[in-house]
Image (spheres, rainbow, N blue to C red):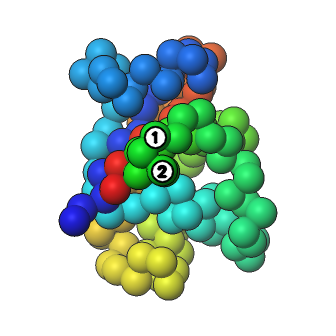
Amino acid sequence: MSVLAHIYVSRDDAEAAEYDSEPSTFAEREQYTSFTVLELSTLWAKMRDVEWDVNLLDQFPSVLQQDDGERAINRLPTVMTESLARLTPEQISVAATKWAATDELACEPGDVLPVIDGLVRLAQTASATSRSLYFWNCV
């Protein structure tokens, strides 16, 4: 079974919740597999050079929970979105190296680089248009 992981830009929580039933209406999105809000929170910790703590998950508020949590939408922290939007290519490379080395991912930096690149692109769009980033997961 694969975990679907989509990141997209939306105006607000109400509009973001519509992604669960109408994802094709969201033009600004990236589709990935195999990670959850846990892995996103580890990226956020690595970007700030802090130890991951379970309380970091609280910074990703739930917008939608369906089917006993098998489908979920969370909003990324505004500060994370703003930080992602400002990452330089060198900082993206460093973040990929740190994130890939986590126990949760344990992969090569090149495996996560496209995810960070997509996050940065979407964060730049969200920041430029006063919108937020959201994360949809389906197990």
> Residue 76 location, x and y as percent?
61, 41
Q: Which residue lies furthest to the front in this view?
A: 68
- Asked whether 55 or 80 is in front, the reply is 55
Residue 43 drawn above or below residue 78: below
Three-letter amino acid code at disc 1? Gln
Is 39 above or below relative to 31? Answer: below
Q: Quadrant of residue 18?
A: top left
Mark 2, residues whose alpha carbon is within 10 Å: few (<14), some, or many (≥20)? few
Between 134 and 63, the residue placed more toward the observer is 63
**Helix or strand or loop: what does disc 1 sit on?**
strand
Identify which residue, 126 or 32, lies in the foreground.
32
Give the left or right position of residue 76, taking residue 104 as reference.
right
| Residue at which label 1 appears | 66
| Point 72% across, 69% down: residue | 54
For the C terminus, which image quadrant? bottom left
Coordinates of residue 8 in the picture (x, y in percent): 42, 32
Label 1 Cα crowd, 10 Å radius (few <14 / some 14-19 / many 20+): few
Q: Quadrant of residue 1?
A: bottom left
Residue at (35, 49) in percent of width and height: 138
Labels 1 and 2 touching (C-beta < 8 A)? no
Determine the residue positioned at 30% across, 69% down. 110
Q: Distance between the residues labelled 1 and 2?
A: 6 Å
Could you say which disc has been placed on residue 68 in the image? 2
Q: Which amino acid does label 2 sit on?
A: Asp
In the depicted structure, whether residue 14 falls above or below residue 92: above
The residue nearer to you, when weighing 29 against 34, is: 34
Q: In which quarter of the image is residue 22?
A: top left
Q: Residue at x 29, y 68 (%)?
A: 111
